[in-house]
Image (cartoon, grey):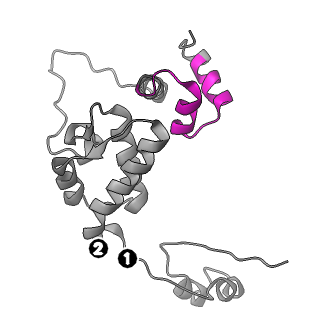
Amino acid sequence: VDVRVIAATNRDLASMARQNLFREDLYYRLSTISLAMPSLRERPEDIRLLAEVFAERLSERLGVKRRVSSDALERLRDHEWPGNVRELQHAIEAAMVVGEGPEILPEHLPASLRDHPVEPLPASAPFRPQTLDDVERVHIEKTLEALDGHRGNAARALGISERNLYRKLREYGLLG
C-alpha cells in the first residue's frame, strides 16, 4: 500500500512531542515535509484574492453571479480573522446567500464584519431570542429563494444531502 497523508494543524507538534503531549513516532511519520503557513491576519494582501476566488466558486455552485464590492473588501481587510481562511470562506458564503444583486455589499456580510453594530431593541420591546431552529429555517428559506426553489442546488449550497433537506423542510412546514 502506498499512502500519503496530508495533515494540517495550528499546533507546534515538535514541541508537543518533546513534552510527551503528542506521540513522537507519529510526529516523525507525519513530518516528512513541513510547510509553515502564516495566518490570514499575517497576510492581509491575500484577503482580496481569496474573497474573489470564494465568490467565484460559490457563484458557480449557487448559480448566482456576484462579485465582492470594494466597500465589502474594505470591511474584510479590517477584520482580525481568528477563524483564518475558513472564517473568510464562510463569511463570503453567508453574504452570497443573503445578498441580492450583482455585488456583495457590507450589509450582506455577517454581523461580526459589519462596521455598524446591531441596533439594540427598544427597552419597551420584549426580547425574544431566536432558537437555532429559527435561524436554520430562515437560512434554508433564503437559500431556496436565492436558488429559485431548486432543492437539489439548495442542498448542495447548504452542504447537506437532499434527503436531509427534505426532512428539514418537512420539519419546518416548508414543503409545498
Q: Quadrant of residue 168?
A: top right
Q: State the residue lying farthest toward the top.
A: 176
Q: Position of residue 20 (x, y in %)?
A: 62, 85
129 left or right, relative to 76: right
100 left or right, relative to 57: left
Decide: is 81 above or below 145: below
Q: Which residues are magenta?
A: 146-169
Q: Quadrant of residue 165?
A: top right
Front residue (pair 72, 149): 149
Q: Which residue is mark 1?
A: 38
Residue at horizontal 28%, vertical 21%? 127
Residue at horizontal 26%, vertical 41%? 104
Q: Position of residue 110 (x, y in %)?
A: 30, 42
* Helix, strand or loop for disc 1: loop
Front residue (pair 51, 35): 51
Q: Which residue is mark 2?
A: 42
Q: Quadrant of residue 36?
A: bottom left
Residue at horizontal 70%, vertical 86%? 29
Number of other residues with Cα within 10 Å of mark 2, as a class: few under 14, some 14 to 19, many 20 or more: few
Q: Position of residue 23 (x, y in %)?
A: 68, 82
Number of other residues with Cα within 10 Å of mark 1, as a class: few under 14, some 14 to 19, many 20 or more: few
How far apart marks 1 and 2 lie (CA) works out to 6 Å
Task: Report the amino acid beneath label 1.
Answer: Pro
Front residue (pair 22, 96): 96
Image quarter (top left, top right, bottom left or bottom right) of the C terminus: top right
